[in-house]
Image (cartoon, rainbow, N blue to C red):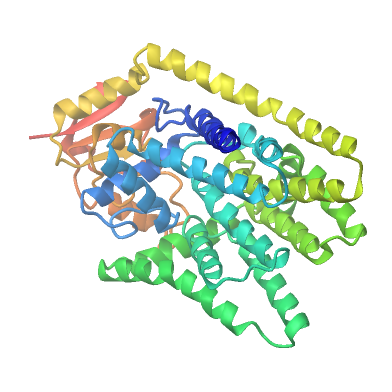
Amino acid sequence: MEKNNKARFLNISIYVIFFVIAFGITCYSSSLVHLTDCPDYDSYAYRYMGMLMAKGGVPYRDAFDNKGPIMYLINWIGYVINKEYGIYFVELIFVYGFILTQYKFSLKFSSKINSVIFVIASITSLSVFFVGNWTEEYSLLFYAVGINIFIDYLIFDKDDWYRIVLCGVSCCCAFFLRPNMISLWIVFAIAIIIRYIKKYKKFPIKISIWFSVGVGAVLLPTLIWLGCAGALNEFWKDFVLSNITYATDHAVVTGRWKVFFDFFISSNMELHIILLIYMIIKKKNAFTNISYIAYMLLNLYLISMKGVLFNNYAMTIVPSLLYPICSFDLYIVKYWKLTTQKLYVSLCGLMSIMLIVFLFNNFTQLIDKMMMGNPYEIEDDFIVSQINEYTDPDDRILVLGYKCFYYVASDRLSSTIFYYSTNNYGYPDGHQAVVDAVNENLPKLIVVEGGEDPEDLFQHYDQYEMIDNNPMLWILKE
């Protein structure tokens, strides 16, 4: 009985520790703390989509953006929970779920205490890359699920149908966050086909069917929903064509490789690949480890394609770092001395220092911000108060710029599908289509971010009067 109580206490303690870590990682997200400085702008664009859906709108048809529908469904759930802080709770659940999934994975290779250390060491890079309420943050869980299932199949020979279906679900969810997030499933699908054919001399038809069932469980309802809402055509333009343009526009080979190596070094990926190469040389799970390196490098290339160093892109590296740590520990236990394993675990513990500093800094800033009442920036608070004063909740407004924060904070919808008026130059129908859409309707109030109309988008200022010059606010004449 006493032994069972100790085991139960240890389990509860581990889950509490991981929850504290998840909270510490996410607690300075703009979803919880009122920050509107870049790079939080994208978060408010996604939150706008969630608000739009809660008010009866449909992504792509009623608002332009190039992310996948899963991202907007997540933000819709957040808005339904609570207009201001609901999305934070969703963030926290996803990050906590990711950490717990990593822990369950680590237990396949090591003890509970060592698994805790390995998981913390593997997520340390989040202290460098984390940005709240971005697609990469939610993808962490889907990557972790996919890695679990592929390693279960390749190393532990677990091929239950429900695992394969879940693998397909995780693949489609990751794709419907952002289309460049499926490197894991591309590489390991090929690896499983090769291994299956080599072992059984035939194509893995049943596995392919079950995987397709998982993909279809997400794909078909999504396409039916968008099709019934008349949004499929715009979905194709926004999600497919615009992303192709975004990935190739102004990207040069030298820029891609510079970003590639910056992410490679800052994530400590080279150390993890060295561990895998050593085990390949020693002929331990060589095929799996070669496939794993291919996945890590392909994922790194896909997030570097734009040739721009956005730290949030590199969050997708983090789930891949646990397997090399755990599998090498198992190798040490089998073939090296116990003292070597203890040294290895200690070194992994030292890797966690950066994350601990990050968590402490987040907790400190959160406490300071909350003690001040979690205020908006003075200018932002003024603009939101003006929007609330001059418009009714059902009135449409227009923000010329990229600060979607004003829509979310005032709970107002945009007068045009181009609710942000910059970064739309990859829209397949061309820039003139953006101009035409912006001028199709007259909003009740206009916020001109930065004091200038970008690209002179709006053409009806003669029907407005200025109510403030700095920042520039315009109200529709009676």
Q: State left or right for residue 448 relative to residue 98.
A: left
Q: Nearer the viewer, residue 161 or 82?
A: 161
On the image, the x and y values in percent for residue 262 come to 74, 41
Toward which corner of the image does residue 471 lie, by quadrant? Answer: top left
Q: Quadrant of the C terminus?
A: top left
Residue 351 visible in this rendered orientation of the protein: yes
Name the residue at the front extreme: 1
On screen, residue 174 above or below 186: above
The answer to whether residue 469 of the structure is visible from this angle is no
Q: Position of residue 167 (x, y in %)?
A: 55, 65
Residue at x 51%, y 32% (from the top left corner): 16
Position of residue 297 measured from the top left corner of the image (x, y, whole percent)? 74, 55
Tell me residue 180's x, y (percent).
Answer: 58, 58
Relative placement, left or right, of 86 versus 182 is left
Q: Nearer the viewer, residue 466 or 315?
A: 315
Image vertical order of residue 82 relative to residue 436, above or below: above
Q: Residue at x 39, y 72 (%)?
A: 220
The residue furthest left is 478
